[in-house]
Image (cartoon, rainbow, N blue to C red):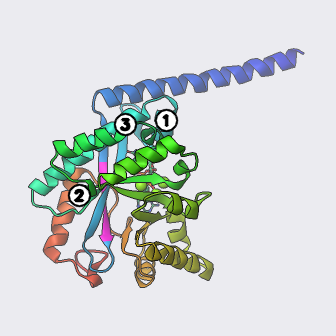
Amino acid sequence: KTAGRNRFSFFSNEMNLLAQERIALETALREALRNDALRLCYQPQVRLGDGRVHGVEALARWRHPQLGEISPARFIPLAEECGLIAEIGQWALREVCRQLAEWRRRGLSIPTISVNLSPTSFRNFDLPRQIAEVLAASSLCGKDLTLEITENAFLDAGPDTMRVIHAVHAQGVRLSVDDFGTGYSSLGVLRRLPVDEIKLDQSFVHDLEGDGASRELTRAVQRIGDSLGLCVVAEGVETERQCALLQRQGYQAAQGYLFAPALPPEALEQWLRAREQAGASPSSAASPAG
Ligand code: C2E
Ligand code: MG
Ligand code: MG
Ligand code: MG
């Protein structure tokens, strides 16, 4: 009995500690959002046909004052649990539109800017109006913006969510299915939603150089996308060999460390200018130097 009680108090102490840590992290995240301490970094997506820029994906970054850089894989789920995710989504939408308009004023040609949105954002009836507003504020049009959403997020999409998605799409905003191929209903999503683009999950790309089965899978995904008239983007491309294979399979665009990691706005601008100067060509898909 005594041992049982001790064990109980041991666990509850540990749970307390975890709960305290979590609350502290939540508070810090809330403050970061208020104080504009969250940042967006931008990763280029490269067209494999001619090496030009397909688009740019915004990825959230958070440097905690004591703990340092915290991965979005950690703080995005936290934001979802503590009700901050809608606010983060609105902040990101505003910020990417402002940034794209600024880059264009500075003479850079970027066809579209992608932002990751959580399913929670699509449950907001006001989302279509909010998007129209941020686009107008930066004098952008619908296709300048691409919304990335993971396929599993669509799984429990009820009629209300579907209405929001269709309303957003009706404004010309592009819809991209992120982490494609990892969910429970990859094909179902394509049938039910007004999708413009699919992003092959990086796990498939990483497996590419191994067995032939992975190569057949990536080929199949490309064919499905192609036959539906979708743009097919491969993510997590790290090697020339992966890039060459995907290019041969007909992938339109690729994104990954081979080209560049997610960069702060100034660094991305430099990267884009270096590329424009080098004159992108099919043979120089990977680097400005070729
Ligand atoms: P994602 O949207 O699928 O983004 C791709 C992730 O892979 C990013 O990680 C990116 O930095 C990383 N990556 C890019 N190229 C390579 C590569 O060649 N190799 C490898 N191994 N990784 C690569 P990150 O930035 O840590 O983001 C993780 C996830 O967090 C994202 O996955 C996205 O689902 C989520 N996320 C990031 N920013 C936001 C945001 O603003 N809002 C929401 N709702 N989610 C976000
Ligand atoms: Mg994404
Ligand atoms: Mg992804
Ligand atoms: Mg992901």
On the question of residue 86 being in view, the answer is yes
Does ligand 1 reach within 8 Å of label 2's beta carbon? no
Residue marked by disc 1: 80
Place residue 64 in its image quadrant. top left
Q: Nearer the viewer, residue 43 or 101?
A: 101
Distance from Cα at disc 3 to Cα at disc 2? 22 Å
Q: Is mark 3 within 8 Å of ligand 1?
A: yes
What amino acid does circle 3 point to? Ile
The quarter of the image holding the C terminus is bottom left
Residue visible at 51% across and 39% down?
A: 77
Q: Is residue 283 above or below residue 163?
A: below
Q: Nearer the viewer, residue 50 or 72?
A: 50
Q: Position of residue 274 (x, y in %)?
A: 17, 68
Task: Tell me the crowding category of disc 2: few under 14, some 14 to 19, or many 20 or more residues within 10 angstroms, Cα based.
Answer: some
Residue 46 position in % (x across, y down) = 31, 70
Q: Which residue is mark 3?
A: 88
Q: Which residues are magenta?
A: 41-46
| Res 268 label | 2
Q: Specify which label sits upstream in the sequence, 3 or 1.
A: 1
What secondary structure is marked by label 1?
helix
Mark number displayed over residue 135 = none
Q: Residue flagged by tag 1: what amino acid is it?
A: Glu
Residue type pointed to by label 2: Leu
Query: Relative to 201, is 289 on the left or the right?
Result: left
For this rendering, which residue is in front, 151 or 91?
Answer: 151
Q: Nearer the viewer, mark 3 or mark 2?
A: 3
> Which quarter shows the N terminus?
top right
